[in-house]
Amino acid sequence: MKKLLSAIIILFAPVICTGCGLAMFDAATQRFDNMVGYDIAEKMGDTLESIVSSGDDVYGEEDGVQIRVLTPTPTEDPSFVATATPFIIATPTPMSDEPAGKKVDEWVYATEAANVRSGWSTEYLVAGSLTENDCVHRVAILSNGWSKISYNGNYAYVYGDYLTTTKPRRVGTTHLDVMEYTLDAAFTGDDVYVLDVKNIMQKPELINGPEITCLTIVLHYLGYDAVSKVTLAEDYLETAKPGEATPFDAFIGDPRSAKESYGCYAPVIVKAANKWFEEKNIQKNCIEVSGATLEEMLRYVKNGVPVICWTTVSLSPTAYGDSWVIDGETYIWRNNEHCVVITGYNKSKGTLIVCDPLKGLVEYTMNDFVVRYKEQYSNACIVTNKIQQ
């Protein structure tokens, strides 16, 4: 019994992390560059309070750490093979033969897994899917029983029997109880580590804002719980209209809107976070760790640093979507883009624990997660302590 109690006490001992460093060897960055086609840019001058170690090897120097920041460019990813999943119609304008119906303005929830289609019958192509308790915005109920919803910045359709206006009991809370989950792991002997990070739901205020919501989740975990996701979205997130910039430069669209709203990647969230830190005179840095391996991201978590990571909605397949010509080059949006915060893992089960702004605190399979992570340019970022020069 004493051994069991000791194991549980050790398991719950807090990990004190005053910051973590990032330093990557040329070989590692070249590996990432070859994998996803990123440009590698060096950023000098910043120092971090601690340095991430792997086994007996220490990456970097104790004085004056050199940081390599991976800057993704919107070029074709040679490792990404487009799936057969079609994307939905590129315009929200109703088709002329759409069945009659009544307009509504309401939030509905999926009662079970259901296909999202580009039209109002099973004869239309599948545009995506919903899982149980997924929340979507319904704009019309058609006479043939189908519902018209806002989906991926456009309109799509779901059969009405799969939707309800009744809010599920657990939506907005956690699907997992961290204390209960960790206790169970202690008795089963699973290799588990979970940070006590509270999830924040992006809806209804930010219909398409998982990225800035994830930053808010991390800031609340660090103790800055006075800042809201809406404030960060309105005052610190750089936005642009479709065709004006790439999602590496700005959030494309408006995170509060369902129409022509897409998303952004790590550099945009890094910029928003550091703008907020500078304005509030907070000695923190948000740095990009795009291209990090799963093991590297789990090492951050083990050191008390949650990782903002890009994946897809419900780990659904990535597919090519709308495209724009920017500075003479064509950029193609990758549908189902999503963002979560990695807060823990269960290596025995091969799963990740993440704060998902659309679902709550959930568990995803590591292998499937990594596939979607790579499809979304392997984007990730973390918040660390900043040391004054």
Image (spheres, rainbow, N blue to C red):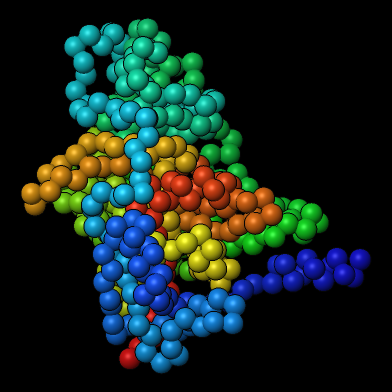
Q: On screen, 271 above or below 244?
A: below
Position in image of residue 318 (x %, y %): 37, 39
Q: Residue furthest right?
A: 1
Q: On screen, 126 above or below 256?
A: above
Give the quadrant of the C terminus: bottom left
Q: On screen, 119 above or below 303?
A: above
Quarter of the figure with residue 102:
top left
Position in image of residue 267 (x %, y %): 29, 61
Q: Residue at x 60, y 50 (%)?
A: 351
Q: Residue furthest left?
A: 328
Q: Residue at x 50, y 42 (%)?
A: 359
Give the quadrant of the N terminus: bottom right
> Can see residue 292?
yes
Task: Judge by depth and name the residue closer to the eye, 39 or 283.
Answer: 39
**Left or right: where does residue 89 sit relative to residue 17?**
left
Count of marks overlaid on the render:
0
Position in image of residue 233 (x %, y %): 29, 54
**Left or right: where does residue 124 sit relative to residue 22?**
left
Q: Residue at x 29, y 8 (%)?
A: 99
Position in image of residue 150 (x %, y %): 32, 30
Q: Residue at x 45, y 90 (%)?
A: 62
> Can see residue 267?
no
Task: Judge by depth and name the residue closer to the eye, 274 or 302.
Answer: 302
